[in-house]
Amino acid sequence: MTTREALPEPRLDVLVRGSGPALLLAHGAGGGIHGNFGLVLDDLARDHTLIGPHYPGAGNTPADEKPLELDELADQLVASAVSAGEESFVLVGESLGCAVAVRAAARHPGRVRALVLTAGFPVADPVLALAARLIKSLAADGRWEEVARLACLSCMTAKDLAEIEPAALDTLVSQTLAAMPAGTVDHFDLVSRVDVRADLAGLSVPVLVVVPTGDRLVLPDGSRRLAAGIAGAELVELPGAAHVLSGPDRATWLRHVRAFLGTVGPGTR
């Protein structure tokens, strides 16, 4: 199996579900496997083996004492899949997980058979960099409810925000706060530092890039820059979709992803 880097001892908390060709899931900052992929886990597990590692400070993975590094995180994801008995896999990334997925494909060619990149970015644009800075600043002051409010503001569409009742918004903020993993600040610190632009031209696997056009946190141009940098990448748009996909938008996402997976050959175990 072709790989440029040795694999570390896996140490991430991992969800494993289903059977069939492997899908390795890379979640976003301040999220987790259920938070990002919960709406489609049961469907995809019908005919795929899902491997969902949690970054440090998410799920049951302890937070790191040092800042997260993209190379190390990418290696840990790949090590999680190999430890689960999967020698190759399709890597499915969301938001920060897209950068993790791209770096994993660059460091471990031959293991990554294809990429699905949703709401991603090669490097933080000024809007995302500002959001990451605000999250870190508010959290440092212990203002976690404001962090949750910023997350809601960023991850909903303008239409949703205009129509939601104040009481419903307060409930959503409380739910967001309760679901926020301990490693949220560490994740967004990494968001502000990743840069995979140099990795894109070297990718030679099939790639599907999905763009939620109503995204207010990772602006749609981030996904478009990913697609433009990868030869042969397929790009599809989810009109009006937010950073956190609604049920109907996730159903559309699933149709596109299943059609794409149908073009990718089975892996090795």
Image (spheres, helix red, strand yellow):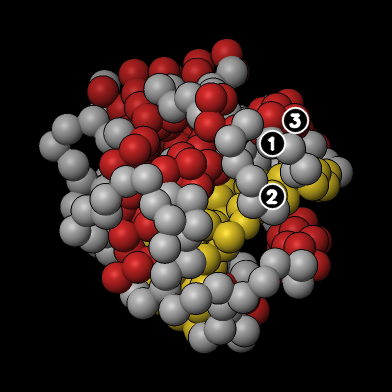
Where residue 245 appears, as percent x and y from the top left, is: 68, 52
Report crowding for label 2: few under 14, some 14 to 19, many 20 or more residues within 10 A (C-alpha): many
> Reading the chain from its start, which is encountered first: label 3 or label 2?
2
Q: How many marks?
A: 3
Kindly state the secondary structure of the residue where label 1 is placed: loop
Q: Which residue is at 53% across, 32% downward?
A: 199
> What amino acid type should be assigned to the residue bearing mark 2?
Val
Q: Which residue is mark 1?
A: 230
Where residue 100 appears, as percent x and y from the top left, is: 46, 43
Note whether residue 66 is visible. Answer: yes
In the displayed structure, 88 sits above or below 141; it is below
Q: Furthest residue to the left? A: 65
> What amino acid type should be assigned to the residue bearing mark 1?
Ile
Kindly state the secondary structure of the residue where label 3 is placed: helix
Q: Which residue is mark 3?
A: 228
Task: Tell me whether circle 1 and circle 2 mark residues in contact (CB < 8 Å).
Answer: yes
Image side of residue 218 versus residue 74, left or right: right
In the displayed structure, 54 sits above or below 226; it is below
Please tell me the numbered disc located at residue 207. Answer: 2
